Image (spheres, helix red, strand yellow):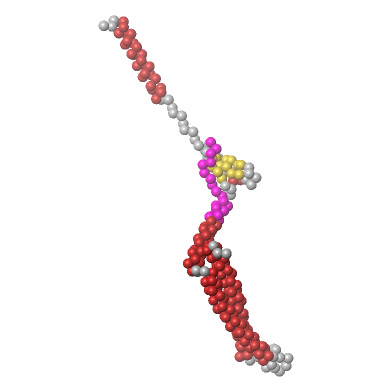
């Protein structure tokens, strides 16, 4: 059995330990946690000389320029693009889409070319048929123009008997039917001349288009 002195010593030690335990716990619990560090955004842009401009709000010099938003460590967390950059990006996107569409259209033309013709002779035959039709149309138009020119000359000769084309003081005024015939003839000449010009342009376009088709067909078929 422990002696009375030993028991008193054990009790005193336990009481001391309890005091230490319960005395220090509240102080640790009451210890305040550190406040989280606030992250203030910093705005940055570069002017036309490449010089950087910073501010906790957007600097006036940055208006209309690309702006970078930095965190407190200097890391770029966001970018604010200017209207010019957005417009350039949109234009680039449209150009890329146009290139894709053009590539798809070219691929479709190749497929159609190979599916439509078996040889270069087939392409040349169709070209010549279409050109022959245009040539025949142009010949007919030229005949109309020649006839209208003759009619115009006859009307001019006839109109010399009338005022204001005649030098005679007592010459009669041009009759309505003669004046109307002259107007119709001149208008007809203009219309047929325009048709002839369109026909000539179409012949040139057809020759060029079929020429490109022949070259591409040879490339696709590996022909010389």
Give x and y (percent) for residue 3. 29, 5
Q: Is residue 76 magenta?
A: yes
65 relative to 166, above or below? above
Residue at 53%, 39% in the rendered image: 75
Q: Number of labelled discs?
A: 0
Give x and y (percent) for residue 46. 61, 44
Farthest bottom residue in view? 170
Residue at 66%, 90% in the rendered image: 154
Residue 63 in sight here: no
Camera-side residue of 72 and 135: 135
Q: Give the quadrant of residue 29.
A: top left
Q: Which residues are magenta?
A: 73-93
Residue at 59%, 46% in the rendered image: 62
Q: Give the quadrant of residue 185.
A: bottom right
Camera-side residue of 83 and 111: 111
Q: Is residue 19 left or right of residue 97?
A: left
Q: Give the quadrant of residue 99.
A: bottom right
Residue at 54%, 69% in the rendered image: 120
Residue 32 in sight here: yes
Farthest front residue in view? 224
200 relative to 100, above or below? below
Give the quadrant of the C terminus: bottom right
Give x and y (percent) for residue 52. 61, 42
Q: Is residue 144 magenta?
A: no
129 relative to 164, above or below? above
Give the quadrant of the N terminus: top left
């Amino acid at each position: 059995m422990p002696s009375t002195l030993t028991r008193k010593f054990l009790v005193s030690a336990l009481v001391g330990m309890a005091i230490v335990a319960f005395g220090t716990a509240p102080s640790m619990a009451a210890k305040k946690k550190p406040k989280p560090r606030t992250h203030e955004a910093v705005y940055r842009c570069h002017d036309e000389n490449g010089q950087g401009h910073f501010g906790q709000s957007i600097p006036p010099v940055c208006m209309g320029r690309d702006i970078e938003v930095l965190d407190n460590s200097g890391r770029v967390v966001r970018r604010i693009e200017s209207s010019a950059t957005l417009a350039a990006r949109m234009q680039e996107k449209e150009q890329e889409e146009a290139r894709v569409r053009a590539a798809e259209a070219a691929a479709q033309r190749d497929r159609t070319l190979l599916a439509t013709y078996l040889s270069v002779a087939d392409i040349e035959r169709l070209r010549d048929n279409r050109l022959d039709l245009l040539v025949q149309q142009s010949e007919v138009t030229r005949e109309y123009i020649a006839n209208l020119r003759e009619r115009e000359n006859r009307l001019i000769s006839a109109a010399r008997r009338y005022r204001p084309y005649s030098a005679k003081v007592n010459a009669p005024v041009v009759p309505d039917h003669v004046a109307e015939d002259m107007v119709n003839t001149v208008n007809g000449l203009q219309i047929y001349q325009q048709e002839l010009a369109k026909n000539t342009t179409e012949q040139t376009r057809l020759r060029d288009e079929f020429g490109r088709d022949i070259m591409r067909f040879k490339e696709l078929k590996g022909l010389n």
